[in-house]
Image (cartoon, helix red, strand yellow):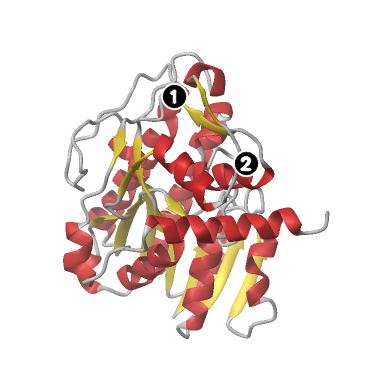
Amino acid sequence: MRVLVTGAAGFIGSHLSELLVAQGHFVVALDDLSTGRIENLAALDDHESFRFVEGDCLDKTLVAKLMNDCDACVHLAAAVGVKLIVERPVHTIETNVKATEIVLETAAEHGSPVLLASTSEVYGKSDKAPFREDDDISLGPTTHSRWAYACSKALDEWLALAYARERGLPVTITRFFNTVGPRQTGRYGMVLPTFAAQALKGDPITVYGSGEQTRCFAHVRDVVKAVVRLLTEPSAVGRVFNVGTSEEVTISALAERVKTRAASASPIVFIPYEKAYAEGFEDMPRRVPDVTRLREALGFVPETPLDEIIDDVLADQRKRLEAPPA
């Protein structure tokens, strides 16, 4: 296939592009490089099955032109990271909702199947874990920008499913649960690369809140494998899939494991949410996926052990720290 990948220069997008090309597909990579890095795509430079286009998903003319030349689209482009979301809520809403609308509209015009990347954030403040794809969602008040991202991605999902029902657009939705691995940065509050960089530099490892909140971390190589298989799985069309691992860890325990595996002397310090973000900031106490639906559809779920994931992130951060200044 010829696959349009939006947000292709990002952390997940670059790994996905590499896997698609390795499996014999042609990738048209679209990214405005606002958060993505062209260096992430270095392995695909001059590859005959890869084309990079610098541009914005909000440019309908450009998206329509690229979509017309492709057989399918994986829409990854979005505002991500808690820090960015809290600091720039207007950017978050506009980027997520408007760009997705343009991608879906142009895909419907050209009959191109779409895999929409969503997030575990859509479950909001629900305390019913593990989360199932058909569970109710519970979001915080509109006065807290923390929930703008969750709401915008939920709206993306509703819009995608509406296009599927009304216009027959083949749509598959994936909800990612804390995807991590090489090339991810801590720039916008991503916890594992932040911990890894702090541990390697000997800086304090900063845990926000009590540290008792739990998360499940999936290796990016497992996640993109699931994405490619869902993109080509007929039974996945019109459905929502959690993509993640069920290995649950508290954030304080994660900090300890990173410190141990880095052989670091860094102290672990706890910072209240209101100092890290803003007064009234709310967080999800648990974020655990039920991956039954994914396993039944693919016979596969992400299962890379957490210690292996941590080691890969530490190795990536060491390379960054050792690299000469640009």
Label 1, residues with CA under 10 Å away: few <14, some 14-19, many ≥20: some
Left or right of 140, for residue 143: right
Give the image quarter of residue 122. Answer: top left
| Secondary structure type for disc 1 | loop
Left or right of 250, for residue 2: right
The residue tagged 2 is 198
Image coordinates for residue 276, horizontal then vertical, percent? 55, 23
Image coordinates for residue 67, horizontal then vertical, percent? 50, 67
Q: Residue at x 59, y 60 (%)?
A: 315
Give the image quarter of residue 46. Answer: bottom right
Q: Is residue 228 above or below residue 276?
A: below
Q: Of the two numbered discs 2 and 1 on the same chain, state the one appearing first in sequence.
A: 2
Image coordinates for residue 56, horizontal then vertical, percent? 61, 53
Left or right of 184, for residue 319: right
**Spatial separation of the CA atoms under disc 2 and disc 1:** 17 Å
Q: Is residue 87 above or below residue 272?
A: below
Residue 209 numbered tag: 1
Image coordinates for residue 28, horizontal then vertical, percent? 56, 71
The C terminus - image quarter = bottom right
Q: Is residue 52 visible?
A: yes
The N terminus - image quarter = bottom left
| Secondary structure type for disc 2 | helix
